[in-house]
Image (cartoon, coloured by chain):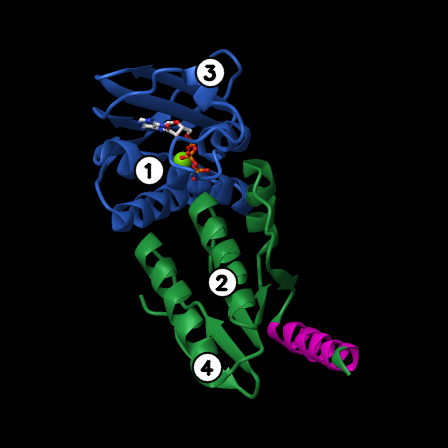
Amino acid sequence: MNDIAISISSDQDIVIARQRGRELAAKLGFSSTEQIAIATAISELSRNIVEYAKRGEVILSLTPSQGNGRGSLQITARDRGPGIPDVALAMRDGYSTSRSLGLGLPGTRRLMDEFEIVSKPGKGTTVTIRKWI
Amino acid sequence: MEVPILKQGDYLIASIQAALSDADLLRLRDDLAQRVGRFRSRGVIVDVTVLDVMDSFAVRTLRNIGQILKMRGAETVIVGIQPEVAFAMVQLGLTLTDVWTALDLEESISFLDRLMKAGRTQGE
Ligand SMILES: Nc1ncnc2c1ncn2[C@@H]1O[C@H](COP(=O)(O)OP(=O)(O)OP(=O)(O)O)[C@@H](O)[C@H]1O
Ligand SMILES: [Mg+2]
């Protein structure tokens, strides 16, 4: 499968990205509970892009199995926005710089099997999440 | 995608027909706040059966709708949250405060009827 890249710069793009994610998850045989978890996670990460970085992209790809015998659906959300000065703090439930709920990042980690975040102030943020097939 | 809002007696019923963008959700909030005043509605039912994603923004907006409509004299009931959607909401850590929930339209109407009746006897 070729990677699917979706550019994100508006609230419409958030809807498109999560729909594409759910379609692909369905095609890969994920249960409807898993499909919805994946779509919800994509929604949170895309919204963070629009909210904090204005623009960026979401990439859907398949990773081959790594040792555990299972491949995974991988979603990368990346932007060249302001970055996050304290990632550990941003990962805490309830921490928000926009007076929102502060659940997007920690909640996304709970929805997925794997979660990685790399962020550099002034450079941007990349969040990579995976769900095992 | 505009959400149709029907008036049924003392209540308004907003039936979401398709996936909503953030802007659509905010428009729904504003439309409901206006119409509750215009129609003197006592209860508002928001049917979310077709939604497959209720993320932090959607939940924050629905809670907001509940708070605003309460100040306008109406109770809000959210109906039709699918089991898989509820599961994802719980994992995200989202809670639906400031609104009531019901399984379907029929249940939400009889719930509001009971609530209104209890409210009247209390007021007498
Ligand atoms: N892509 C990003 N670029 C810059 N900062 C970000 C990015 N994503 C998240 N953040 C920072 O991390 C904080 C926590 O993000 P998280 O998504 O958990 O919560 P939130 O967006 O504030 O609220 P919620 O997602 O619940 O509406 C944000 O308030 C913001 O400061
Ligand atoms: Mg967020």
Give neighbour class at mark 1: few <14, some 14-19, many 20+ (Cα, 10 Å): many
Query: Alpha carbon of mark 2 to alpha carbon of mark 1: how far?
Result: 27 Å
- Which range is magenta? B105-122
> Can residue B86 be seen in the rendering of this structure?
yes
Q: Earlier in the sequence, mark 3 or mark 1?
A: 1
Indicate the amino acid at tag 4.
Leu
* The residue at label 2 has a CB less than 8 Å from ligand 1: no
Give the chain ID for the green colour. B
Asked if both marks, 3 and 1, belong to the same chain, the answer given is yes
- Where does label 1 land, which residue? A46
Asked if residue A66 lies left or right of residue A75, the reply is right
In terms of depth relative to the viewer, which is nearer, A44 or A21? A44
- Residue B66 placement: quadrant: bottom right
Q: Are marks 3 and 1 in contact (CB under 8 Å)?
A: no
Indicate the amino acid at tag 2.
Ile
Instruction: Chain letter for mark 4, please.
Output: B
Tell me the tag on residue B68: 2
Indicate the amino acid at tag 1.
Ser
Say above or below: B15 vs B25: below
